[in-house]
Image (cartoon, rainbow, N blue to C red):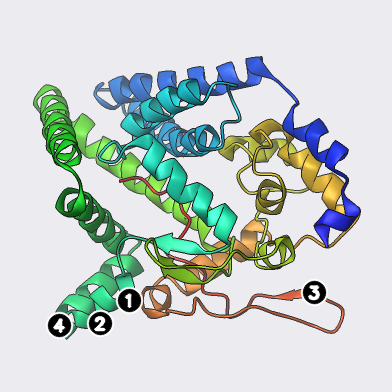
Amino acid sequence: MLTSTLSQSNWNSYIHQQKPLWNAAALFYTIGGYYGGIFLLSTQAIGLNALGIFLVTHALVLSAYLAHEFMHGTLFSSIKTNHRWGALMQWLHGTSYARFQDLAQGHIDHHMKGVDLYLFDRIAFINRLPAPLKRLIAALEWLYFPALFFIRQAAGVGLIYQNGTSAAKIRVIAVLLLRIAMFAALGWFSLKGLLLYSLAYVGAVQIIAIMDCLQHTYELHSYDAVIPKKSLAYEQSHTFSTPISRRYPWLNLLLLNFSYHNAHHAAMKCPWYSLPQLDAAITQQQDIYHISLLQVLINYHRFRVQRLFDENEGHISFDAQGNLNVDRFYGVMGGTSLLLA
């Protein structure tokens, strides 16, 4: 499929393209937006508070997508340098309970094995819950509060502590205490700032969940499962691109081009700024399944409760002309996502 239509030399032209100023701008904006935004959340002016919510939300989202880039080593040539910066992005969005290299390996396994991997089995967990708790979680998700996300992330941290080495246990405790202390300090300095930060955090969770939920129809497996490697044809046929806009591609920079997901899976070492060009090159030679942002939003909204309980993630089909029919595509919850913890 893709291997027969796009030459290796063309792959390399996208993989090795370097734009250090673009990387520097993304890092500067993300770090500056995060800490500058937190300051604005604590001011008295409502207009500055609103700007702070936007900056913190956007910075949290970008820190997750930059961490993803560091997982693939696309910003620096040194693995250690990518890991150090990846760890910094972890700290911003709160996944420092696990080592960055462990999270990176889990994500690379998603690429290499062509499956979605999980630590926490949400379906088994929900099925064991009493009916009132199921209804409570469903009601919160209906109201766009990501209750299951927080449960899943807390369970993930608990599993890291339970199954980890002594060093891993110490790391979990140290990070947890430090983050509690920092949020307590923010609350002491400005309770409003802490509450608005919580709002921005939930907003970031929702944005990443929306962009992630329709990008794959992969099988779900636990991390310790034995999984045969899938073919590139399988990988591409079960991957979907969800651009913010194809007419105005610059808008996709708001999410570091993460929505060009077929291109990313075709060449996972391709840096974020080259993905639109790679997407265009692949599209000229084979079908890439693009799902519009409007359709993504419709499906995310329509199936926000059903998605909790559906193990098969809905289904997707094609008509005789090969056009997508996504009417019953529930999408994933978690899976390969880079959701914050």
Q: Nearer the viewer, mark 1 or mark 4?
A: 1
CA gap, disc 2 and disc 3 = 35 Å
Asked if the residue at tag 1 contacts the one at tag 2, i.e. Cβ–Cβ closer than 8 Å, the answer is yes
Front-lying residue, 334 or 101: 101
- Front: mark 2 or 4: 2
Say the numbered circle drawn on residue 323: 3
The residue depicted at 14 percent of the width and 40 percent of the height is: 166
Cα–Cα gap, marks 1 and 4: 14 Å
Residue drawn at 31 percent across, 69 percent down = 121
Counting residues from the start of the chain, the first of labels 2 and 3 encountered is 2
Find residue 40 and report its image quarter: top left
Q: Around disc 3, counting alpha carbons within 10 Å, would you say few (fewer than 14), some (14 to 19), or many (20 or more)?
A: few
Q: Which residue is mark 1?
A: 123
Q: Using the numbered discs, state the Cα–Cα distance from disc 2 to disc 4 in whole angstroms.
A: 8 Å
Mark closer to the observer (2, 3)? 2
Q: What is the quadrant of the N terminus in the image? A: bottom right
Give how far across and how far down residue 257 sits, in percent: 64, 40
Question: According to the image, label 4 marks what residue?
Answer: 130
Is residue 247 visible from the viewing direction of this image?
Answer: no
Few, some or many residues within 10 Å of mark 1 (<14, 14–19, 20+): few
Kind of residue at disc 2 = Asn
SS of the residue at dot 1?
Answer: helix
State how far apart marks 2 and 1 are (Cα): 6 Å
Q: Residues within 10 Å of mark 2 (few under 14, many from 20)?
A: few
Residue designated by label 2:
127
* Residue 329 placement, left or right of 203: right
Secondary structure of residue under mark 2: helix
Q: Quadrant of residue 168?
A: top left
Query: In the image, residue 10 lies at what x, y percent?
Result: 86, 38
Amino acid on which disc 1 is placed: Ile
